[in-house]
């Protein structure tokens, strides 16, 4: 199983988690996040949503986000399943699952991955509202969520070890 899957059909959370942890006795914690379609966004009723992506580019972008999480935290594995196509309120959109020895690392990595997915992964979202269809941009709050992950590493001055 790869670390990223894009599909139109729904998914079963239990099956996906079982697949991620199969044969991994060192796993002490699994953190999952499931995002769903809301019926209200930016003050407008949402009757339906359609997600589009750029095949190949989207998977590579998400895989790079997972790679960053693996480099930052001592997690064992991470998996992202993202749906595309037409969706209705209450439909599942995305699954992020992270395995680790301990919960703290898994929670942090899971939050990191979803924060980056919301703004950096190449998806385009169109909502159907009573006023018509509209393309949805990333929220300011989504951009702000990334700020906590952007930590500058201090540069060593000449002569410092």
Image: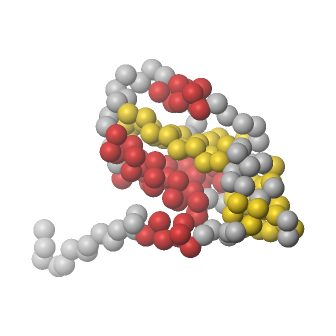
Which of 74/147 is in front? Answer: 147
Quadrant occupied by the N terminus: top right
Q: Is residue 82 visible?
A: no
Q: Quadrant of the C terminus?
A: bottom left
For the question of whether residue 68 can be seen, the reply is yes
Q: Is residue 48 left or right of residue 98?
A: right
Residue at 66% across, 60% down: 122
Say if 62 sits above or below 29 in the image: below
Horizontal and vertical percent for residue 42? 68, 69
| Side (left or right) of 129 relative to 56 | right
In the displayed structure, would residue 105 be above or below residue 132?
above
Q: Residue at x 58, y 44 (%)?
A: 34
Q: Nearer the viewer, residue 120 or 42?
A: 42
Residue 139 point in image, percent of width and height: 60, 69
Q: Is 94 on the left or on the right of 159, as rendered? A: right
Quarter of image, res 49 = bottom right
Q: Nearer the viewer, residue 58 or 36?
A: 36
Which residue is rendered at x = 63% and y = 68% of the image? 138
User: Residue at 48% of width from left, 71% of height from top?
Assistant: 144
Query: Where residue 20 sits: x, y (%)?
Result: 51, 30
Q: How many marks?
A: 0
Image position of 34 with respect to 26: above or below: below
x%, y% of residue 40?
70, 60
């Amino acid at each position: 199983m790869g670390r990223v899957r894009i599909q139109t059909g729904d998914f079963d959370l239990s099956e996906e988690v079982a697949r991620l942890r199969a044969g991994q006795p060192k796993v002490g914690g699994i953190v999952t996040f499931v995002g769903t379609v809301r019926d209200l966004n930016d003050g407008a009723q949402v009757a339906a949503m359609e997600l589009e992506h750029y095949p190949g580019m989207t998977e590579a972008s998400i895989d790079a986000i997972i790679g960053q999480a693996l480099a930052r935290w001592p997690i064992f594995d991470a998996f992202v399943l993202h749906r595309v196509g037409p969706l209705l309120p209450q439909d599942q959109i995305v699954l992020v699952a992270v395995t680790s020895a301990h919960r703290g690392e898994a929670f942090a990595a899971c939050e990191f991955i979803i924060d980056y997915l919301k703004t950096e992964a190449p998806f385009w979202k169109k909502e159907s509202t009573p006023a018509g269809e509209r393309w949805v941009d990333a929220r300011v709050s989504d951009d702000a969520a990334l700020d906590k992950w952007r930590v500058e590493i201090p540069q060593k001055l000449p002569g410092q070890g």
